[in-house]
Amino acid sequence: MDDERISLVARMISEHVASPSLRHIRDPAIIGRLAREIVEATQRSGVLWIKWTGPRETVIKAAATVWLPIDDLVSFLNSLPGPRLTRTDVEQRLRAIWEEPYASYPNSAVTDVCRARYAAESAAGTEFIAIVGALAELVEHEEERLRQEREEQCRQAREAERARSLGRFNAGADIGWTSLGQPGVVFSRRNGRLFRGEQGADRRWRLSRVADTADAGKLIGTYLTRRDMTKAVEKIAYEPEPRW
């Protein structure tokens, strides 16, 4: 519906500016008439939610991003100009907004903090529309905090996995590619045999069979990706050792 209205307005404006007379295009009376025609045309073009005009639409779209008591929202919306709204009117308008492209339902992870903030602001006598704005800011802050917490948890999980991998490596267990801290260098043990992979300036991997982590070893081959190097190790590790 919005795309259709935008196309309609764009067409009317294009027709107006297509006039060869610059004076005609800039005439205040003609501009005023064009403005009225645009408003009337958009009001006629496929309006489904006839109760949602003016500030009501602005409020419901802001409210759609946060948790709010539905009954309080209905009461506030009914205090604004327009036909009386029922609870169903509001619930279904919210649902329609949530199902629009690029929209989403309110984040349930921040519902409790929104509920607590709403109660506190209501008790303090804060105006409803101000509470909506405050909750929107709160949700933005809380979602950023949760995102940072998830990133930190992921970082800690990676560090823990790296520590476990290092422990298995030092214990002599077979293990996939493991970094010991040297950039571009990884080690893998397969079938009890130790391999070293080093990525050069050309981004290719050089695979060597080594006796230990300090050993330069013997070059086996050069590979475009680490996956290719891994496939080589999976084969070479079970071939007769005298080859090296």
Image: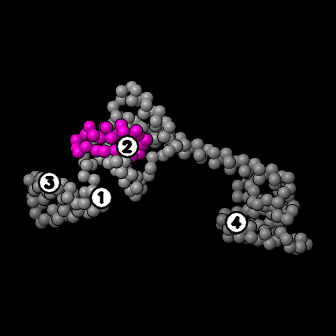
Q: Residue at x 76, y 60 (%)?
A: 176
Q: Is 31 inside the magenta-drawn segment?
A: no
Local packing at callout 3 (Cα closer than 10 Å; few below 14, some 14-19, many 20+) is few
Q: Residues within 10 Å of mark 4 (few under 14, many from 20)?
A: some
Which mark is drawn over residue 2? Answer: 1
- Mark 3 and mark 2: span between their CA atoms? 30 Å
Q: Which residue is disc 3 drawn over?
A: 36
Mark nearer the viewer, 3 or 2: 2
Quarter of the figure with residue 224: bottom right
Label 3–label 2 contact, CB within 8 A: no
Q: Earlier in the sequence, mark 1 or mark 4?
A: 1
Q: Residue 29 at x, y = what percent?
A: 8, 53
Q: Residues within 10 Å of mark 2 (few under 14, many from 20)?
A: many
- What's the magenta region? 64-87
- Which of the numbered marks, if any, corresponds to residue 226? 4
Q: Tag 4's secondary structure? A: helix
Visible residue check, residue 139: yes
Amino acid type of disc 4? Arg
